[in-house]
Image: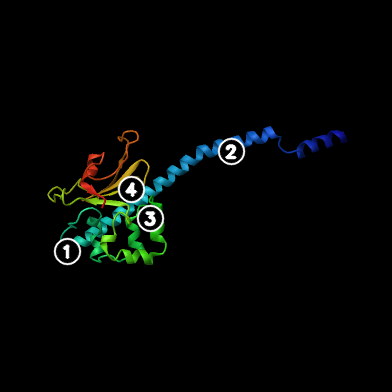
Amino acid sequence: MRKQCDTLQLRGQRGFTLVELMVVIAIIAAIVALVLPTLGGARDRAKAVECSVNLKEIYGTINLYKGELNHYPSASGVRFFLQPWERKIIENDSKYAKIYVCPGDENLLQMIEGDYSFVAEQLEDLDHFDSEYTSYAGRNQKDYPMDFNKRASQLIVSDDDEMGLNHRTLVNVLYLDGIIDKVRLDDLAEGEEFYVGEDSPIEEFRVLQSD
């Protein structure tokens, strides 16, 4: 009886065999492979939501501009939505600079959140505040001026520009009536790149300009 107990105790202490260990590792690897894409998708969705909040803030600054000057910004591209900055209706600080950066544009976001003194000096001149410092594209007012008799459904700002996608499957958009929506990129041909401007593969984005 004692010998049998000793044998059982030894079996309990022997640990995993190599085969059992390999099976456990394989199971863990399979679980990780299933979970990682889900986590990545959740992070991307969260960044897309933060991005839409940025567009809401940008719309607010455009309306501050209109309220003070009694007209909408007249410039094209990024300068369309940056004129409130140029007129100093909003302050040159990292809080406001961040609303022009999509959370999916991580490198630019790190620059804004880092030593802002250098960025602030650059952005004293609106000519420096181009696509290098913003993730968004604005209305091309020169070639596609807004029709204020047709307020709704006029695209004025979008996420993403010629630098590539900030979200994997969609682009956030802002319309003149304040509606914030998303355009899914399901219709793009395989291997086709998204960008805004007159040659955009999606007609809706041809009224925008990134510089």
Residue at image coords 26%, 60%: 127
- Residue that mark 4 sits on: 163
- Residue that mark 3 sits on: 108
Q: Earlier in the sequence, mark 4 or mark 1?
A: 1
Q: Which mark is in front, 2 or 3?
A: 3
Residue 55 position within the rendered picture, expressed as x and y whole percent measured from the top left: 30, 53
What type is the residue that disc 3 sits on? Leu
Q: Report the Cα–Cα distance between label 4 and label 1.
A: 32 Å
Q: Tag 3, which secondary structure? A: helix
- Residue that mark 1 sits on: 69
Q: Earlier in the sequence, mark 2 or mark 4?
A: 2
Judge from the rendering whether residue 59 lies leftward or rightward of residue 39; answer left or right. Answer: left
- Residue that mark 2 sits on: 28
Does residue 163 lie above or below 3 as drawn?
A: below
Q: Earlier in the sequence, mark 3 or mark 4?
A: 3
Residue 163 position within the rendered picture, expressed as x and y whole percent measured from the top left: 33, 48
Does residue 31 lie above or below 69 as drawn?
A: above
Q: Tag 1, which secondary structure? A: helix
